[in-house]
Amino acid sequence: MDLQHLERELIPLTTYAAPVIVGSVLLEFWLTRHDEDHRYESRDFWSSVGIGIGSLLINALLKTSVFGFALFCYQITPWRFEIHWWSWLLAYALIDLCNYFAHFIAHKQRVWWATHVTHHSSEHLNFSTAFRNSWTQHLKLIFFIPAWMSGIDLVVLLTCYQINLLYQFWIHTEMIGKLPRWFEFFFVTPSHHRVHHGSNDRYIDKNFGSSLIIWDRLFGTFQEEDEKPVYGLTKPVESFNPVYLNFHVWADIWRDLRQVRSLRAAWGVLFGPP
């Protein structure tokens, strides 16, 4: 397998899903236009759109590099799995587990928080909030090395990666209440993800799963939605500017690094808690 073959074989699911995503945002906007509690706030919405457009441009620029990194990890792995129905399930579970740990660490260490804080900057939760993907989020691809080196076919893995990413769109809403108990037990739902975006004390650093909530149940990070979430950061952002929202934590880290006088102190600045 080479890079050209990989790009040719991989179906761009996120591109095909774009009309559904845009349609869902428009529908939610229309349904909440008279709702004071849930309607879209203009500056917040356009901030999300600006961040989303920037993410799309960066994704396009880095596409070859991302595929190349995954392909390198795949090619240095000496074993291979045949493509069967169960290999798709294994691939998806592995991608989801890697996503869980990447997400968990992004909330625990400052340098990784800088790649994720943008997503939590909105004080609203609607479908447009899902557009707030950090412009530096690709740094977290190192957490997916176990998947790229698993020996599972790379087209299968990257297809599951896209499906996992698309799943996360629909859970950013207050329009969908709690779902059947069996579904809420296994899968991430809007109720679970509202908790994750809440800045309430009992909600902070909970429900890291991207599509399977079972990881949170297994690792003790699950929290039921049992009070109304207050969205946004514990220290509210000072601007709706997409550039500020993407880089304000990076700027803070750089300011603090300039003041340290030892490697230990620098390590604390980078990998201490946010």
Image (tube, rainbow, N blue to C red):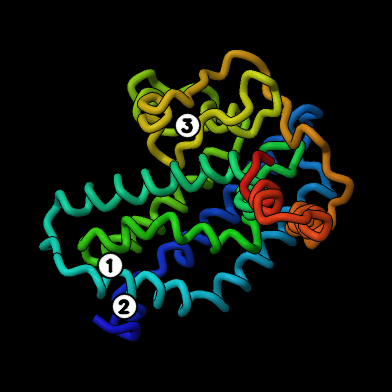
Q: Earlier in the sequence, mark 1 or mark 2?
A: 2
Q: Which mark is residue 6?
A: 2
Q: Is 198 in front, or is 52?
A: 198
Task: Report which residue position mark 1 lands on.
Answer: 154
The residue drawn where x is 70% and y is 22% is 200
Q: Are marks 1 and 2 in contact (CB under 8 Å)?
A: yes
The residue drawn where x is 68% and y is 23% is 229
From the top left corner, tell me how far across and down residue 242 is, in percent.
78, 59
Residue 199 as seen in the image, left or right of residue 162? right
Query: How far apart in space, not on screen, are marks 1 and 3 (Cα)?
Result: 28 Å
Occupied quadrant, residue 266: bottom right
Quarter of the image containing the C terminus? Answer: top right
Disc 3 element? loop
Q: Which mark is residue 19?
A: none
Q: Earlier in the sequence, mark 1 or mark 3?
A: 1
Please state which amino acid type lies under the numbered disc 3: Thr
Residue 153 as seen in the image, left or right of residue 24? left
